[in-house]
Image (cartoon, rainbow, N blue to C red):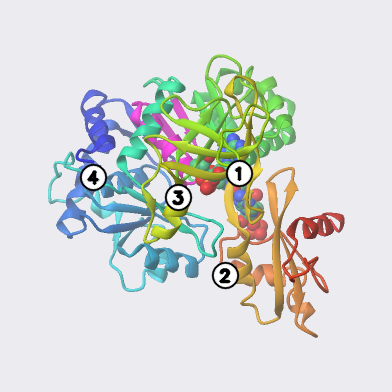
Amino acid sequence: MSSSPLIGRFEWLTRERAEHLAIVDDRESVSFELLGQRVRRVAAELRARGLSGRRVALLVTQGSRWVEAFLGIIAADAIAVPLSHLHPEAEQAWFVQTSRAATVVASAETRERVAGFAGGLPVVLVEALRESSIGPADIDTGARDVAVILYTSGTTGKPKGALISQGNLEATARLLGRAWQWSADDVLLHCLPLHHLHGLGIALLTALYAGSTTRMLEKFDGPRMWEEMARATVVMGVPTMHKKLLDAFDAAGPETQGRWAAHAARLRLVTSGSAALPTTVGERLRALTGRYPLERFGMTEIGVGATNPLDGDRVPGSCGPSLAGMQLRIVKEDGTDAAPGESGEIWIRGPSVFLGYDENPAATREAFSEGWFKSGDTAVFLEGDYVKIMGRTSVDILKSGGYKLSALEIEEVLREHEAVADVAVVGLPDETWGEVAVAAVIARPGRRSEVEGEALREWAKARIASYKVPKRVVVLDDFPRNPVGKVVKPELAKVLSQGA
Ligand code: MCA
Ligand code: AMP
């Protein structure tokens, strides 16, 4: 790729929509012009530090400073590695080392935490970068292929770094902008984590690309979301957020409910993705907003592959037909295309499909077949090319509250506990989270109490993000196994659900 498709568009917006608000957070409102000035300063500073072409990690409070740091990194021709405050020090250090980050960008509030895991790397504050006296850089130069690395859990122990280009991000923003008819008049209410593609590419960058305003909350908060909806036109969430929004609504008094319902009724668009939207949740949202939420299918590696239409039939339980500009097949085990009603794996091709996994050519090769990315999702075509996702092909991939969890990664960590003789993690259905991770543990003789109750969970929280920590630990004498001794996870899941 020879130009900066995303940054080029952003440059244009800083001139053409100069006065229009780009980002509004709890501290300030930032116009496209001001955002542009700050991004240029961040880029100039990073360039002056020799970081073009290098990887730059960022742990910055979500809001305007995050956006300035992120765009500044890619405008400096560096590669952004977004981190999340939800990860404990050990995991952060792993991300920083594995990504080979050369510097970490922090904000005033995250500085101390970052110092704890940066391992001697320079730590720079976005507040200082954006006030740089070097003078703004010309930000529209040739972009390197990779703009951002997002870590995604897979069927191997540790997460893999997905290499995503500016072209990939631009394609998602452009295709969604067209399909969902984004305009500068839109106001996106944003509460999604920015270290994943949903919050970053599908929500934030799509809104920015359209010249819309993004109202950013530092984190999801049900009652605040309802209040802020008064000034929004678009809300995007994972199904768990929608469920939690409805729980907050149900817990509110009649007067508050009346106000919130009026806010919801004014929204132009409510979308759901990252996991299957339960139709009970969808129908309740329909009653409040007047339309069934728009469900779509996406993935870190591919952007968005399928979407229900903005206008026209949104089919509950389906992710709609392929997104215009992307190609989607459902392929059977024998390599042929599935007829409607037949199940197979979703394969995707198109401009937002990523470049590959960082330093992992074998995993990249395995993920593709003749240019098609193999998603690992089992699905069927309903009538009219609408896609219905049936589940993951691998039993070891879970989706909990929209986060992809690897059972193997969690098992690897729990196995390090000295009282654990063996462990198997499975996903069980859950009304709020969609799926929750549950760990079955065989304790070493006489050491049961060290893993029971909250003990193993608390131990694990120092090692992995608390959203990855199994919600329940069940101590068993043995697991259901096949004749060669391998754990039969579907059987184990049955045993654990009976005990729930
Ligand atoms: C928080 N906890 C979780 C999760 N989130 N446990 C399991 N799964 C989770 N997703 C844990 C907390 O660590 C805490 O643990 C306990 O649950 C209670 O947390 P709570 O305060 O209720 O949670 P919250 O802060 O309200 O978070 C819920 C959330 C959050 C807002 C739904 O999970 C979230 O932001 N999810 C979005 C994930 C996402 O963006 N995925 C997109 C991937 P304890 O009490 O033990 O300390 S990208 C993708 O999928 C593709 C591209 C696509 O199609 O979009
Ligand atoms: P991630 O790797 O975190 O980007 O998650 C991508 C995965 O989320 C996909 O492969 C699907 O398994 C799942 N996913 C995304 N959108 C949907 C949806 N609307 N319905 C069901 N699963 C979804």
Question: Measuring 54% from the left and 56% from the top, which residue is drawn there?
Answer: 154
Going by the numbered disc 3, the residue's amino acid type is His
Instruction: For the residues labelled 3 and 1, say whether their Cβ atoms are less than 8 Å apart.
Output: no
Question: Measuring 59% from the left and 55% from the top, which residue is drawn there?
Answer: 405
Q: Mark 4 and mark 1: span between their CA atoms?
A: 43 Å
Q: Mark 4 and mark 3: span between their CA atoms?
A: 18 Å
Of the image marks 4 and 3, the number of the one nearer the N terminus: 4
**Up-down: is 243 above or below 424?**
above
Q: Mark 4 points at which residue?
A: 75
Q: How crowded is mark 3: few (under 14 residues within 10 Å), some or many (20 or more)?
A: many
Give yes or no for residue 332 being in the magenta stretch.
no
Question: Measuring 21% from the left and 39% from the top, which residue is drawn there?
Answer: 37
In what element is the residue under mark 3? loop
Q: Mark 3 and mark 1: span between their CA atoms?
A: 33 Å
Q: How crowded is mark 1: few (under 14 residues within 10 Å), some or many (20 or more)?
A: few
Instruction: For the residues labelled 2 and 1, say whether their Cβ atoms are less than 8 Å apart.
Output: no
Going by the numbered disc 2, the residue's amino acid type is Ala
Going by the numbered disc 1, the residue's amino acid type is Glu
Q: Name the residue under label 2.
A: 462
Q: In which quarter of the image is the N terminus?
A: top left
Of the image marks 4 and 1, the number of the one nearer the N terminus: 4
Q: Mark 3 points at which residue?
A: 195
Going by the numbered disc 4, the residue's amino acid type is Ala
Q: Mark 4 and mark 2: span between their CA atoms?
A: 35 Å
Disc 2 versus disc 1: nearer the observer: 1
Residue bounds of the magenta highlight: 187-216
Question: Measuring 70% from the left and 66% from the top, which residue is drawn there?
Answer: 424
In what element is the residue under mark 4? helix
Q: Mark 1 points at which residue?
A: 333
